[in-house]
Image (cartoon, grey):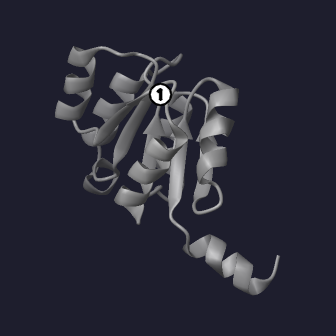
Amino acid sequence: MSIEQSNKRIARKSILIVDDNESMRLLIGSYLEGNYNIIYQNDGLQAILYLKENVLPDLILLDMEMPNINGRVFLRRVKTAGQQLGKIPIIFISSVNSRSLIKSTLRHGAIDYIIKPFDPSELTDKVKTILG
């Protein structure tokens, strides 16, 4: 990798994808990796630990149903944490299609909710709108 390529990679915005299904993590990442730095975590607990110890991502894509810490608990922890962490935009990507749950997540700080299965262009358009 050339220095120019390396600098472009460093300058790109980063997205943390949190989903307990490895295939889904990789699929979501494949739609975005050409334009963003992608970080993968397999559950909410691992993602919380990652956020405490690393440079914060510019966006979090989050599954709802996961072991250890589910999406609802993760959202609450992030949004009530320090000011910098609480400002990270979060989009849920979940197969849970409940109108009341979607409204609740938006009310508690998520900026959007995408239902699986989803159209890849819907995801990339929303991410581009948020991150540019």
Q: Write down the quadrant of residue 74 in the picture.
A: top left
The quadrant of the image that shows the C terminus is bottom left
The quadrant of the image that shows the N terminus is bottom right
Q: Write down the quadrant of residue 29 in the picture.
A: top right
Q: Write down the quadrant of residue 33 in the picture.
A: bottom right
Indicate left or right for 94 with 98 as reference.
right
Q: Residues within 10 Å of mark 1 (few under 14, many from 20)?
A: many
Task: Name the residue rendered at 65%, 71% in the picture.
Answer: 9
Indicate left or right for 112 with 117 as reference.
left
Task: Name the residue rendered at 75%, 85% in the picture.
Answer: 3
Task: Name the residue rendered at 25%, 54% in the picture.
Answer: 83
Q: Position of residue 99 (x, y in %)?
A: 24, 17
Helix or strand or loop: what does disc 1 sit on?
loop
Q: How many marks?
A: 1
Q: Height in image: 130 above or below 97?
A: below
Residue, disc 1: 63
